[in-house]
Amino acid sequence: MVSSKRVYNWYIALVAAMCMVLYGYDASVFNAAQGSDNWLLWFDLDTKRDANLIGLVNTAYTIGAIIAGWFLGGPTADYFGRRIGMAIGCILTIIATFLQAFAPWHNLGCFIGGRVLVGIGQGMALTAGPTYIGEVSPPEIRGKIMTFWQMFYSVGSFMAYWIAFACNANKAKLGHWDWRTVVIFQILVPLLIVILLPFQPESPRWWIKRHGDVGRARACLRTIRDTDQDVEDEILAIREAIEFEHEALGGGRGYLALFRDPSVRRRLYLAFVINVGQQLSGQGTLNSYSSAIYKKIWTSSETINLINALNATFGIVFTLNAMWTADRFGRRWLLIVGAIGMAVCMLIVPIVGLTTPDVVSADGTSTTKTQPVGISIVFLLFLFIFFYKPSWGATVWIWTSEVFSMNVRAQAVGMCSQMQNVANTVFQQFFPIFLANEGLKCLFFFAATNVLLGVFVYWFVPETMRVPLEEIDALFGGQNHAEKGGQLLGVPAAGAQTQAQTQVGAQGKQEDAAEIKEV
């Protein structure tokens, strides 16, 4: 029977996880908006004449997100708290939504300004959100809860694509509200988060690290841990880790501490690689250019919009696979299996496309694939999402949020998460040319990349499943912060206490069994 405190623990973590809807929605909403003739008319744009300007609208968002993730999100979450970091990100997104939806006639600058601001908001929320989840979740369910972080990305895409599909079907009635409706719905989830955040506890680790307030940290833990013993053990582990970071590491925190400790540097570089790899696996490109790829197979824009919407729908279901695999088989297993599956899909898709004949369209102006071939390619791309979502979608976020020590966690998570946008910004500058020149053959690149990612994980990425946050440094050649902090405080480490209690209990059971045998 699940306790009420465990249910509440899930609730507060899921409120934080909803910040990912911001990312999923905005990653899809601009594709929907720029596909509207009314949007192009409102800002006096032509897709051929103003291709670079339209590209700038998309790049403005990623620049804002990168700046916030690298330089603003971490310090804000550390100084004001994880809840305030998430709230600021959501409020900026709400303001930015109105700037975009109600930009004046032919004033593209206002729309771009809104894109920059929503990027900053997203960068702030995506730094504080996973940090908060990692700090309030017990180790045994941390992977399950972080699964919802990635799932809410799919929820954001689901909302954007289905709203866009509905608006496109009724664009004659809606007029300029066809693209405005898609944009303005972006305020829905951040508004809900801002309303809910004040009524849930702050991270207990932040209370002790920022204010040294053990009392408030204990009060927070009592709302989400089942027993007083669990609360006291966790309080002790947090105090020990923070004491070690303060004394042994000279109180180093933030950006300087990221490069002072060799074990932290190692984690940072590993997290950089897997976050960049998440986007170079092919998912980032499919999310932005799926319509362009599908146009080589289908001629109907309505069909393409429906496929995108169904893709987002299945993405929600596929992500849930991480719920029962992340904490059962581990992070490494998911990343390796996911990489192999994605590589196979990206290998077969271009083979099918290149070895099947083209047919002339009904109007005689273009060539496409036959419907059975098109269906098979779409099926393979859906299968790619089946492998991606629970592995390089959800697990990359799980691993990134749990490997850093308290003194650098917020800054590191913010920087690593925005490496996804760095990779996207760079790669997507030349992918349209790559696609135009090579067609479906460009997918061989992703097949090779996924093989390399699987090999990288096998050799370099350690398993973090069910390891307490305060003890995770030991996996990377660092010292156990809880154990060393316990020595500085002159008390047994919390992990050692738990182990000793387990050993005593086991010894007692053995003695009882011996007595029963004698009788």
Image (spheres, helix red, strand yellow):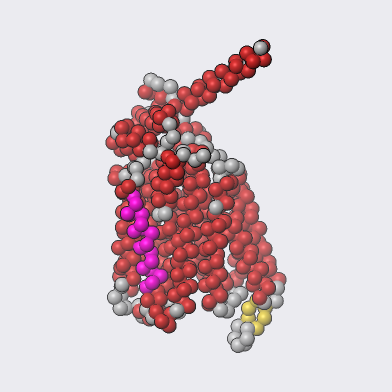
Which quadrant of the rendered structure holds the C terminus? top right
Residue 19: image location, x then y, percent = 40, 54
Residue 394: image location, x then y, percent = 52, 51
Q: Which residues are magenta?
A: 180-197
Residue 489: image location, x then y, percent = 37, 23
**Of residues 424 and 100, which is closer to you in this image?**
100
Any magenta on residue 190? yes
Residue 403: image location, x then y, percent = 47, 41
Q: Is residue 38 above or below residue 30?
A: below
Identify the residue at horizontal 47%, vertical 23% (top origin).
Answer: 497
Viewer can see residue 52: no
Viewer can see residue 226: yes
Q: Is residue 405 above or below residue 384?
A: above
346 on left or right of 14: right
**Of residues 514 and 330, which is closer to you in this image?**
514
Any magenta on residue 207? no
SS assignment for the magenta stretch, majority:
helix
